[in-house]
Image: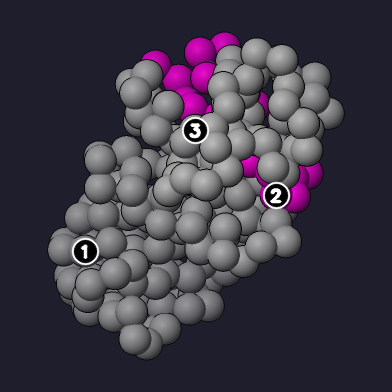
């Protein structure tokens, strides 16, 4: 099974990796303008369409007053269809910081369900790792920051980065993991108990493994 690719309403420049034939494309509200610009026909169009300003034909429409964001509606649909990897474009660089934070929590929602999501912005990629690990290949440069997501993250190890950490503890009350750097060596970040929010330069691309 491919990846569930969700286009959200925030700023967007270009896909970070080619779309595959078995990817499932969802346009969430204003994300439809991105798919149209790219000439992509989404499998589904979903949302309340307060951002887009009109209801496109064939869309599944939800009320504006609801608990889920449009991005979360799309994530739920992808999970229902059996997808376990998610790319969310237009999910970082929008005009509303609260929606960006909501998207961080959407990553945690996915991690809690044994899935992985990536927020892809114009300059950064973001993911959440829960009770697991993530690895990057050799030859990378740029920044990578690691934050505790929620309760204390214990047994945190960071190897192959400029600042190393071995079996440490990260808390949500102090940003110890901000502004680390790739060194060109293979990089590995893991957490035994808890969740980590990782933010890195988009130029580094996607990790090679995650658990």
- Identify the residue under disc 1: 194
Query: Which residue is painted at 49% across and 33% down in the image?
Result: 74
- Crowding at label 1, few (<14), some or many (≥20) Cα neighbours within 10 Å? many
Query: Which residue is painted at 72% across and 44% down in the image?
Result: 51
Decide if residue 173 is on the left or right side of residue 36.
Answer: left
Whether 40 is drawn above or below 99: the answer is: above
- In x, y percent, where is residue 79? 35, 28
Q: Earlier in the sequence, mark 3 or mark 2?
A: 2
What secondary structure predominates along the stretch shown in magenta? loop
- Identify the residue under disc 3: 74
Q: Earlier in the sequence, mark 3 or mark 1?
A: 3
Indicate the secondary structure of the residue bearing disc 2: loop
Q: CA distance from mark 3 to mark 2?
A: 15 Å
Residues rendered magenta in the picture? 1-24
- Crowding at label 3, few (<14), some or many (≥20) Cα neighbours within 10 Å? many
Q: Quadrant of the C terminus?
A: top left
* Most distant residue in the bottom direction: 174
């Amino acid at each position: 099974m491919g990846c569930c690719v969700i286009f959200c309403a925030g700023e967007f420049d270009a896909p970070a990796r080619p779309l595959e034939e078995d990817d499932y494309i969802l346009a969430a509200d204003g994300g439809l303008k991105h798919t149209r610009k790219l000439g992509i026909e989404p499998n589904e169009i979903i949302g309340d369409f307060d951002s887009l300003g009109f209801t496109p034909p064939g869309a599944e429409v939800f009320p504006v007053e609801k608990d889920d964001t449009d991005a979360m509606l799309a994530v739920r649909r992808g999970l229902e269809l059996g997808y376990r990897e998610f790319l969310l474009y237009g999910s970082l660089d929008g005009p509303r910081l609260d929606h960006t934070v909501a998207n961080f929590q959407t990553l945690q929602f996915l991690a809690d369900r044994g899935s992985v999501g990536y927020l892809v912005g114009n300059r950064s990629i973001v993911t959440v790792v829960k009770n697991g690990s993530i690895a990057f290949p050799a030859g990378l440069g740029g920044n990578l920051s690691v934050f505790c997501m929620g309760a204390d993250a214990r047994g945190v190890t960071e190897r192959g980065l400029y600042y190393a950490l071995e079996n440490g503890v990260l808390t949500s009350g102090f940003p110890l993991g901000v502004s680390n750097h790739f060194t060109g060596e293979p990089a590995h970040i893991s957490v035994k108990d808890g969740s980590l929010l990782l933010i890195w330069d988009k130029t580094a691309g996607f990790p090679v493994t995650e658990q």
